[in-house]
Amino acid sequence: MKIERERLELLKEIMAIDFSLLELNLYLDTHPYDQRALALHNGYVNKSKMLKEVYEEKYDLLTHKHVSDCPWEWIKNPWPWEIDYEMGGK
Amino acid sequence: MWIYEKKLQFPAWVEGCDLKIAKLMFAQYGGPDSELSAGLRYLTQRFNMPIPEAKAIVTDIGTEELAHWEIIGTLIYKIIDRATPAELEKAGLGPHYIQHGHDLYPHDAAGVPWTAAYIQAIEDPIANLHEDLAAEQKARVTYEHLIKSTDDRGVKETLSFLREREVVHFQRFGEALRLVQEHLDKKRV
């Protein structure tokens, strides 16, 4: 399913930032005193939060933990496996 | 506790409709070294890990494996979604179509259903972590075999991402193993 260009780009940006966060999460699990990695992680936390607020306000909820209008917004299509990511990471 | 986020970890894409690679990718959906085995193995081994670093790493990698399972499922879904029964049959997915239609099912590339016999949890963290290290290497090789078996640029790019994750997980499990060994050595003194 195609989604509008602007939405797809924002979604991919969120996916990329959350991936960086996850990578730092795993690294910090075995290097809990690495201050440089911690600073990077904390920076991405704020960036991710900011972008998700924009995405959820403009397009669709990313989790169900969000105030919803009627009808219940969480069930809206498309679901992640249905989206056409157009050349993926590029 | 888990919560679903309405996004994939990686923007999985397919260029064409290589049904043969869809059939082969079931290796990573429900085969012995699949993302499903990895996720359930690590999440099952969590309970007796002796140090916080190790509890965290098996929990977090186990969780990431479920996201990879979803990516493999997405690739297969995107390829088989529009295929006709005749096309599926021609690609060797005839039996799959008869039993599961266009749904996915956790079986391997040959149709053998997933079993918990693929994974182990045996209390000893050194033994468990060694199994995890081996699992990551086996999954890496499976991805290399898959990448060599298709020309679809989207499938190749997505599988290459997943292959790299196996390498990173191997590194992190190795660090966890070293930390657990140091912890056990200290206890013995």
Image (cartoon, helix red, strand yellow):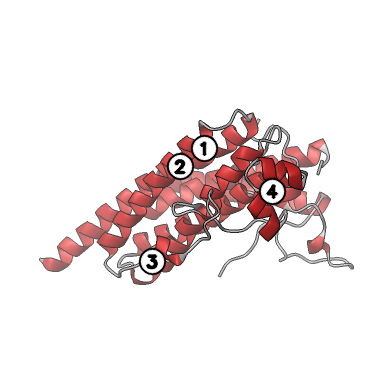
Q: Are marks 2 and 4 in contact (CB under 8 Å)?
A: no
- In terms of sequence position, does the residue under pointer 4 or pointer 3 come before the other? 3
Q: Nearer the viewer, residue B139 or B95?
A: B95
Residue at x-position 56% and y-position 43%:
B24
Location of mark 4 (residue): B77
Instruction: Tell me, yes or no, whether the two marked residues, 1 and 2, touch with CB atoms within 8 Å.
Output: yes
Q: Disc 3 marks which amino acid?
A: Gln
Dot 4: element:
helix
Q: Residues within 10 Å of mark 4 (few under 14, many from 20)?
A: some
Q: Quadrant of residue B155?
A: top right
| Amino acid type at image mark 1 | Leu
Q: Amino acid at mark 2?
A: Thr
Q: Nearer the viewer, residue A61 or B35?
A: B35
Mark 3 crowd level (few <14, some 14–19, many ≥20, 10 Å Cα):
many
Q: How many marks?
A: 4
Label 4 to label 1, Cα distance in Å?
17 Å
Q: Secondary structure at mark 3?
A: helix
Q: CA distance from mark 1 to mark 2?
A: 6 Å
Front of the two marks 4 and 3: 4
Q: Single out the residue that lies furthest toward the left.
A: B189
